[in-house]
Structures are given as C-alpha cells and as structure tokens.
Image (cartoon, rainbow, N blue to C red):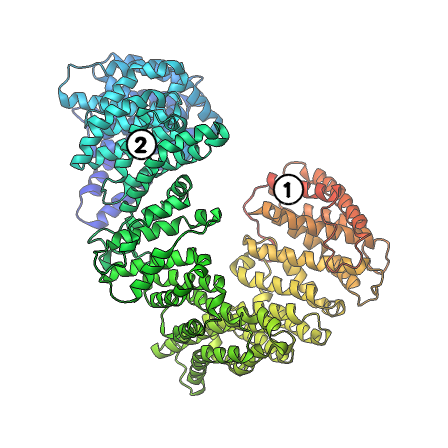
C-alpha cells in the first residue's frame, strides 16, 4: 500500500471510525507522518491529482494543512529548486480549487503566502508571485483564487508577527514594503470585481463579501498610505464600502473596513461624519425599533470609532456631530441583554469629555464654555441613560444567577466596573453640585409611606454617587447628603417592603456611599447612631459585608465624636462582642476590629478602656482556651469537624487580638502612664500564647501564622515591658521552627523581637543562639544552590531579613562574636542573590550590603577597636574567605532573570567590597588589599561558562570593572570622611562620579547578557 493511500485511510479513520482506540492510533500516525520528509511530496501529490483519481475533501484539506504547517516551521530545509516547484504546485492547486471548497482554497493560499514570505533566496518573491497571478487571472475562474490569495497575503505578515514570529523582522518589513508596492494594481483589481453585475444575487453577495474581506486585509496592512491621501475621500472603493452598509449580507464587513479606515486616516472622519445622519435615519433608527442587535452593534462600533478618531470634529458641535452624539446616546439606552452595546460607546464619551475639559488650554476659555453649553445637556442625558442601564432590572436578581462577589448578574457587574471613568468625566463636566442634584432629584419621596419607591433606581443612583467620590472630594465642596442619610435611616425602620435580594444590593451601595463620604458624616450628628446600626446590620449579609466593614472603619477614623457619645460607643462595642457570631472574611473582620480599635485609641479614661477591652476580648480568650483544651484532654483530631471549627475560631481570635495590639500600641503610650491597658491585655493573654506556642496546634500553618502575627504586634506594642518574657519567646520560636521548618512565620517574628530588643546587650547571647538554631536547621543547610532557594523562596527571604535585623540592630561586639554564623549566612546570601525569586534575591543582597556597611563603619570609626574580635576584623576575615563567592554571586545575579532590578543593590555591594579592600590595604591586621579584589574578580569571571560571555569579553570586562571599582571605592572613602560614626555607612554610595560609573557599567553588562537564570552553587 503506497503512502498516499495510507494517509487517506488514516484521515478516514480519524474522522469517522467509531472506536476511540482506532482514532487515537490514526491521529498518532498522522502526527508522525507530518514530521517526515516524505510529507512534502505526498501532500503535494494529493492536491495535484486529477478529478478522476482525486481523494475526498477531508484528505485534501489535511494535505493542505500539512503543507502550511511544514512551510511555517521547516521551509528552510527545502532546496531552492524544490521551493519553486512547490510554489508552482500550490498555484495549480489554487486554480484547481478556485470554485471551492472555500476552506480548502483558503488553506492552499495560506500555504502559498507562507512560502513566499520565507523565500529568502528570491530577489523579489512578491513580484514573481504577482506575475504568476497575471497568468492565472486569464484562466477561467482563476480570479477567485487570486482574490483569496490577495486576502491572505497581508494576513500572513500580521499573523506571523503576532503569533509565530518565525520570520526575521527585517525580512518581514521588506516583504511588506514589496507587497504594498502593488497597492495600485490590487485596488484596481478589487474595483473591477465590484462592477460585475451579471451574477445572481447569491453569487453577487458572495463576491462582494470576498472583495470586502480582501480590502479589509489590505487596509489593515496600510495599503491606503501608499496612495495620495487627498484621493481617499473620493475613491470609488470607499463608495462601494459605504453602499455595502445597506445590504445585510455585507453589512458586518463594511463596518469593519470603514472602522479600520477611520482609525488609520485622519481625513476620513470629516468625510464620513455628514453621511452618518443618513445612516442613522436609514439603518440605526429602524434597527433600534425592531431590536436588531447586529445592526445596532455594528453601527455603534463605527460611530464610536469615528468620534474617537476626531474629537475636535465632534467638539465643534455641528448638526452632524450632535446627530452622531444623539445616535450613540440612543444606543446606550438600547436594552441589550449583555450590556455590550452600551459598553462599546463608553470610550467615545470619555474621549470627547477629556477633549472638552482640555479646551481651555488649547482653544481658550470662551470657546470651551460655548462647547460645554452645548454638550452639558448631552452628558446630562447620558447620565440618565447610564443610570438606567446600570439598574438591576425586574426579574434579574434571582439569587442563583448572581455573581458571588458583587451580588449582580455577571454582565451587569462587568458593565458597572467599566463605568468608573465615564461617570467621573460626567461629574467633571456637570460639576459635583449638578451631578448630585440630578441623582438626588426626587429623593425626598424615597422615604414617603404614601409613594411607591423605584428601588432599582435608588440602588443605581447610590452606585453612581459612590463611583465619583474621588472627583467630588477633590473639589473640596461639602454637598448635601441629607436624602441619603434619611434613606438609610428609613431602611433600618423595617417599614420598606423590598425584595430581600434587592434590599441587600441597596444595603451594599448605601454602605459604599457612607464609606466614600465618611468625612462628611460629622455634619449629620443625629445620623451617626442609625448609620452605625445600618452598617452593623449589613455585616451578616454576604454581598454587603465587605462594603459595610470598610465603611465602618472609615467612619470611625473620620468621626471623632463616636467615642464621646455613650450610646454610639456602646453600640460599637456590641458590634465587637458579636463579631465572633458573624461569618466574615479575615479582611472584613480586620476592617471592623480596626474601626473599634481606632475609637478605643481616642479614649482618655483608663478604666473605660480596660472595661471595653475586657468585653471585646472575652470571646477571643474563650476561643483560644477552648482550642487548648482539645489538646490537653488528649482529643486532638486534626481532621475532625469539631477540631476544624475550634481551630478556625482560634485563628480568628488571634487575628482580632493582634489587631487590637496594633491599634492601641501608639496611642496607649501617650494617654496612659505605664502602658497599663496594654500590660493588662498582655498579662491576660500571655499564658495562653505561651501554651499555644508549646502545643501541637502550631503544626497548622494558619494558626502558627496568626499566633506569630499576634506575638509580633504584642512585642511592638508593649516595649520594654516585654523584655522579661523574651527568653521564653525566642526559645519557643526556635523550637517551633525546628519542628515545623515550613512555617517561616517563626523566623519573621524572631526578626521583630531582634528589631525591638537587639540594641540591649543583655540579650546578645540569646539572639546569637537564635541565629545559630536557624542557620543550623536542616532547611537552611540545604539552601546551597539557587535552585534550592527558588524552591523555598519565603524561607530564604525570611532568614536573610532576620540576619539583616541581627546585624543592623545588635551591638557591634555581639555581631562580631557570631563570626562563624555570619560567615555561613554570608555564603548563603551569595548563593540566594542569584535566585529567580525577586524577593529572596533582594533580601539576600540587602543582608550582604548591611553586613559590609556595618563592617565599613567599624573600620572607619576612629574610636572603634581594631582587635581580633572587632567587627571590622571579622568582616575583613569573612570577605577574605568569601570574596570570590560574593563577586561570582553578583555576576550570576546580573546574568539572570530580573537582572536590571538588581543592579542598584549589586552596585552598592561591590562598592562596599571595593572600599573595604581600598581602605584596608593600609592595615596589616585586615589581610585585605586591592590585589585581593583583583584576584577575586579574575577568578569569578574566568569560572563563568564560556557561553555566558562574548568572544574576547573576559579581558575587557575585568579591566573595565576594576577601573570602575577603584573609582567607586575612592568616592566612598572621600565621601565618608565627613560621615564617620555612621552605623550602616549608607552615606556615600553612588554619590560621586565613580559610584555612578560603576552602576552604569553593571547596568550595561546586565542589559547585554539577557540569559535565563543560570544555576549557582552546589547542586
């Protein structure tokens, strides 16, 4: 059996066999066949068979697709003579199938255009192709094939550029220019095909669609840029396209062509705008009346593009321009189920609004006011239309159809998001006062018992008020929100009969308005308590919970009188007490607790604050106690439902406790001597926290994180009063990390403790032991390659941040005493700075810079000890042993992913290292000099794989870098002369020409070597 027959049978099995195993086998065989050299010849022969021996359509289509794919991926393997033969064969196949099937003809033409685009050995491949087309045109129905080929030729250029990118950009540009040089002949060919009236209607419509599709392809590639621009408005093809709008069969393509032309040629909007009036009357108005979405959608896209392309033309407010605006205004109100039509007009309105608002600078204030006088009524009507379209219509708020986050139908939720910019522009044009007046018109009837309230309208107007809050508040004018206040109070009365789901949406929109304009609430003192009740009532409503929690936080931040009004304060405390009964997300719960904590922080009575805290924290104490009992009673079942509930309650209790610590930390010190309220909380909860840290519950990552966050806030809030507990805390953190090394929260909390208490020399040995435990852990011992660092980036980042805190906060003698630990961590930092994970790499580089800076400060401090155990001596020793690793790490970091983001840190580290060698050369105790730096750089560069550097680059790189490093070191030394005594030595980096030159050298190196991140360190 020959190969052609095998292919035909395999295609038949693939498409029609009932057995899936046979179809899979056929597919695998055909995939393998496509990658063989024989596929070229077999596929070509299948297409070339005469009508007697021809295969069926599916086999021929498969053959054409095989040729197209192989040309796009493997055309370079063909010899020049084979390419010429293949092109001739494809031309003959195109002629053969010029009458159809259309999909087969298209695949053949795509293969032919792909071949011509890749014909690098032909001097003018397009010209040769067009010569062949001239012969083909005179042969019967060959013009159909020419039309299809002319359509796909420009598409091939754009498709390859966007998707395949398999052709050199210069080659693609040359091909495009050569293609466009035949613009005149192509346009004349298309024009001839528009005059053929001897066909039947169906054939004529089909030909017109083909002409329009071909014209669209050439317009997209820029064909009309090749003809005199003054001739475009009167070009016969433009009339053909315009007339094609009147025919339903060609309407969509005509719209696409005109839209593309308008976006590319600035002279066309002026020509088409007068024609839009007739289009509106003849096409748009009937389509709006009959609900023809296809016609409306097409005309909207064309009209909107026309306005966006020439906003100055629309701003002239001519009769035609206002007719266009009126047409689009009607389209906004068109009741399209998916809001797509209204949404497609929004960019038009934004473009015109921005142009109108900027006219004062470009045309003068007088002309701007004239234009605004004309367009403000238009935008006022637009506001009405947008509010109407953003309503939740009757019957659309069935609960099962609603989006879980917004409580709206999906399409409406998306539409509302897109209204942000248009509504803001309308507010700027109308002014906040007029905008508010329009939305609140008739609001006095919303709370009337005698009237029927259009609640959908109310909800939409509240939404529109919230969307422009930034614009309104920037204006600085206090506007009247009384109707909204009355509405929200009225809703709490329970007298309004509203569908529950719609009621929830109104609750959400009302809460958003309260949150957005919370700074104005002070002007409505009688409404504060009802508003708190309104927001509290919305917390149990899933769709409104987030808005209510946010509004509550903003209101408590902006309304200072809440703490002074006993009834209001009591209501807020009750919200906090009941919080554990409400199922909120952690973020929502945090907003509510922050709101309460903000009010508590303003209290001046210690007794009142203690009483409130006791009530607020009682549920948290009970929840943590209940969780601990599950363990003490021996009933720890990590997968039981009851334990999961207890665990969740414990996590939320810790979360709330941590927020109260955070909120009260700064204010308590100011208001109460001795930090009494904070110490009372600490005394009450520390035994529970200590037991929790020593229990098996911390195996759960969520609980461990919550406990560590709470502990961090407690440490930061309590100050020196926490010092006596520090040994127990550090021991618990160390032991927990050893037990659960995936929980990096223990390292992060230890870093917080170091930052708070590191300056106290009494705790030096404690912090050194903690560093030893972390460094010796299995997790950090395995951190010996960039790959390992990328596997555990959070661990690497947390460890490097801890070491930075240790070096930055502890006394010099404590840092110097941990020399062996610092050497190990310094080597790991040199590895981690090459990681792909940006956070881990930057943390490692920050630690290296911090350590070198501390050593330099010690070295340059006239009063510092230069003994064997001094920080300067320890730093010099570590640099001497690890200098080559540091430079290697920096090199690999600059060769990897996100290298440009690491240039600044790399420059600082290398300048510090160079400065150490530059300054230390005069001190025999340090054993460092400029030769040390030179030897490290030479060794590190020569150790790079040869493929990472260009030919001969090693010599020039070493010389360039050494020169820049010497200048940078000298700059640092000079600039530090007046800054002795600084702890980190931050002053002086990249301040002079030398430092800036080094940064430029490193940036240019990173920019010139864009490789995938290479591995570094032991694998």
Q: Where is residue 695 in the image (x, y as percent from the top left)?
A: 49, 81
Q: Is residue 63 visible?
A: no
Q: How many labels does the image show?
A: 2
Badge 1 local density, few (<14 within 10 Å), some, or many (20+)? many
Q: Where is residue 566 in the image (x, y as percent from the top left)?
A: 45, 74
Q: In this view, does 671 lie to the left or right of 657?
A: right
Q: Position of residue 112 (x, y in %)?
A: 33, 25
- Which is closer to the viewer, label 2 or label 1? 2
**Which residue is denoted by mark 1 in the rendering?**
1003
Q: Position of residue 445 (x, y in %)?
A: 26, 55
The numbered disc on residue 325 is: 2
Quarter of the image with the N terminus in it: top left
Which circle's residue, 2 or 1, is located before the other in the chain? Answer: 2
| Residue 593, placed above or below residue 79 | below
Residue at 47% across, 63% down = 559
Quarter of the image with the C terminus in it: bottom right
Q: Do residues under tags 2 and 1 come within 8 Å of each other at their CB atoms?
A: no
Residue at 18% across, 37% down = 291
- Residue projecting furthest to the bottom: 633
As measured in the structure, the alpha-carbon distance from the residue carrying label 2 to the one carrying label 1 is 52 Å
| Residue 138, placed above or below residue 465 | above
Badge 2 local density, few (<14 within 10 Å), some, or many (20+)? many
Q: Is residue 273 left or right of residue 1003?
A: left
């Amino acid at each position: 059996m020959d190969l052609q027959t095998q292919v035909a049978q395999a295609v038949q099995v693939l498409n029609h066999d009932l057995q899936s195993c046979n179809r899979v086998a056929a597919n695998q065989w055909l995939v393998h066949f496509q990658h063989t050299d024989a596929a070229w010849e077999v596929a070509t022969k299948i297409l070339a068979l005469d009508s007697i021996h021809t295969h069926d359509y599916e086999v021929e289509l498969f053959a054409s697709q095989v040729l197209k794919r192989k040309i796009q991926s493997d055309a370079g393997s063909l010899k020049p003579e084979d390419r010429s033969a293949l092109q001739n064969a494809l031309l003959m196949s195109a002629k053969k199938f010029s009458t159809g099937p259309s999909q087969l003809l298209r695949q053949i033409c795509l293969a032919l255009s792909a071949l011509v685009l890749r014909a690098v050995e032909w001097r003018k491949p397009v010209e040769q192709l067009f010569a062949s087309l001239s012969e083909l045109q005179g042969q019967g129905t060959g013009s159909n094939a020419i039309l299809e080929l002319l359509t796909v030729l420009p598409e091939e250029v754009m498709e390859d550029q966007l998707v395949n990118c398999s052709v050199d950009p210069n080659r693609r540009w040359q091909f495009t220019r050569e293609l466009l040089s035949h613009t005149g002949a192509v346009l004349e060919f298309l024009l001839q095909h528009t005059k053929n009236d001897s066909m039947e209607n169906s054939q004529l419509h089909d030909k017109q669609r083909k002409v329009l599709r071909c014209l669209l392809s050439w317009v997209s590639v820029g064909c009309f840029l090749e003809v005199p621009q003054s001739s475009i408005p009167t070009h016969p093809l433009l009339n053909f396209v315009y007339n094609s709008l009147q025919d339903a069969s060609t309407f969509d393509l005509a719209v696409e062509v005109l839209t593309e032309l308008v976006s590319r040629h600035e002279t066309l909007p002026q020509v088409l705008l007068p024609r839009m009036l007739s289009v509106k009357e003849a096409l748009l108005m009937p389509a709006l009346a009959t609900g023809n979405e296809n016609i409306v959608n097409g005309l909207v896209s064309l009209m909107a593009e026309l306005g966006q392309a020439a906003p100055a033309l629309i701003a002239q407010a001519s009769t035609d321009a206002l007719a266009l605006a009126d047409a689009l205004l009607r389209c906004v109100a068109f009741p399209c189920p998916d809001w797509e039509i209204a949404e497609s007009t929004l960019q038009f309105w934004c473009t015109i609004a921005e142009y109108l608002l900027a006219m004062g600078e470009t045309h003068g204030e007088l002309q701007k006011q004239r234009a605004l006088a004309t367009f403000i009524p238009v935008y006022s009507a637009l506001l009405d239309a947008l509010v109407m379209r953003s309503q939740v219509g009757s019957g659309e708020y069935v609960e099962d159809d609603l989006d879980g986050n917004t409580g709206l139908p999906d399409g409406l939720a998306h539409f509302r998001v897109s209204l942000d910019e248009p509504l803001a522009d309308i507010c700027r044009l109308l002014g906040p006062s007029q905008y508010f007046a329009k939305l609140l018109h008739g609001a006095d009837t919303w709370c009337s018992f005698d009237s029927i309230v259009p609640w959908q309208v109310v909800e939409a107007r509240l939404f529109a008020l919230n969307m422009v809050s930034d614009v309104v508040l920037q204006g600085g004018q206090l506007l009247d929100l009384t109707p909204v206040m009355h509405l929200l109070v009225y809703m709490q009365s329970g007298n309004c009969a509203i569908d529950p789901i719609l009621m929830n949406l109104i609750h959400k929109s009302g809460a958003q308005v309260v949150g957005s304009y919370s700074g104005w609430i002070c002007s409505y003192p009688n409404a504060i308590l009802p508003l708190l009740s309104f927001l509290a009532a919305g917390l149990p409503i899933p769709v409104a919970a987030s808005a209510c929690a946010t509004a509550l936080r903003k209101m408590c931040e902006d309304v200072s009188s809440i703490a002074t009004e006993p009834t209001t304060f009591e209501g807020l405390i009750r919200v906090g007490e009941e919080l554990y009964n409400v199922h909120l997300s952690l973020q929502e719960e945090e907003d509510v607790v922050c709101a309460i904590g903000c009010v508590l922080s303003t209290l001046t009575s210690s007794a009142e604050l203690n009483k409130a805290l006791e009530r607020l924290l009682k549920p948290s104490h009970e929840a943590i106690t209940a969780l601990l009992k599950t363990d003490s009673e021996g009933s720890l079942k990590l997968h039981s439902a009851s334990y999961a509930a207890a665990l969740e309650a414990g996590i939320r209790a810790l979360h709330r406790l941590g927020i109260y610590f955070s909120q009260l930390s700064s204010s308590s010190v100011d208001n109460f001597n001795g930090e009494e309220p904070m110490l009372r909380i600490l005394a009450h909860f520390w035994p529970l926290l200590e037991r929790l840290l020593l229990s098996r519950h911390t195996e759960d990552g969520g609980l461990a994180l919550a406990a560590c966050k709470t502990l961090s806030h407690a440490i930061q809030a309590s100050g020196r009063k926490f010092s006596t507990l520090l040994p127990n805390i550090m021991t618990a953190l160390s032991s927990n990390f050893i037990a659960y090394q995936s929980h990096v929260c223990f390292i992060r909390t230890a870093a917080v403790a170091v930052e708070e208490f590191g300056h106290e020399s009494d705790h030096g040995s404690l912090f050194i032991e903690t560093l030893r435990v972390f460094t010796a852990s299995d997790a950090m011992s395995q951190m010996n390659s960039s790959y390992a660092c990328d596997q555990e980036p959070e661990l690497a980042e947390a460890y490097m941040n801890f070491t930075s805190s240790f070096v930055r906060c502890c006394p010099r003698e404590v840092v110097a005493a941990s020399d062996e630990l610092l050497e190990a961590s310094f080597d790991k930092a040199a590895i981690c700075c090459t990681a792909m994970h940006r956070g881990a790499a930057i943390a490692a580089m920050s630690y290296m810079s911090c350590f070198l800076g501390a050593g330099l400060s010690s070295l340059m401090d006239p009063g510092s000890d230069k003994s064997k155990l001094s920080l300067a001596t320890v730093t010099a020793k570590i640099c001497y042993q690890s200098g080559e690793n540091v430079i290697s790490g920096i090199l690999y970091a600059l060769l990897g992913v996100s290298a440009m983001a690491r240039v600044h840190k790399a420059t600082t580290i290398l300048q510090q290292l160079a400065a150490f060698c530059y300054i230390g050369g005069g001190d025999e105790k340090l054993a460092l000099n400029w030769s040390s730096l030179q030897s490290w750089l030479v060794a590190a560069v020569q150790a790079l794989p040869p493929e990472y550097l260009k030919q001969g680059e090693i010599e020039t790189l070493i010389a360039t870098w050494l020169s820049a490093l010497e200048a940078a070191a000298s700059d640092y030394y000079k600039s530090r002369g007046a800054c002795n005594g600084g702890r980190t030595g931050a002053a002086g980096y990249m301040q002079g020409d030398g430092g800036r030159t080094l940064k430029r050298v490193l940036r240019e190196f990173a920019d010139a070597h864009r490789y995938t991140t290479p591995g570094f360190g032991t694998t």
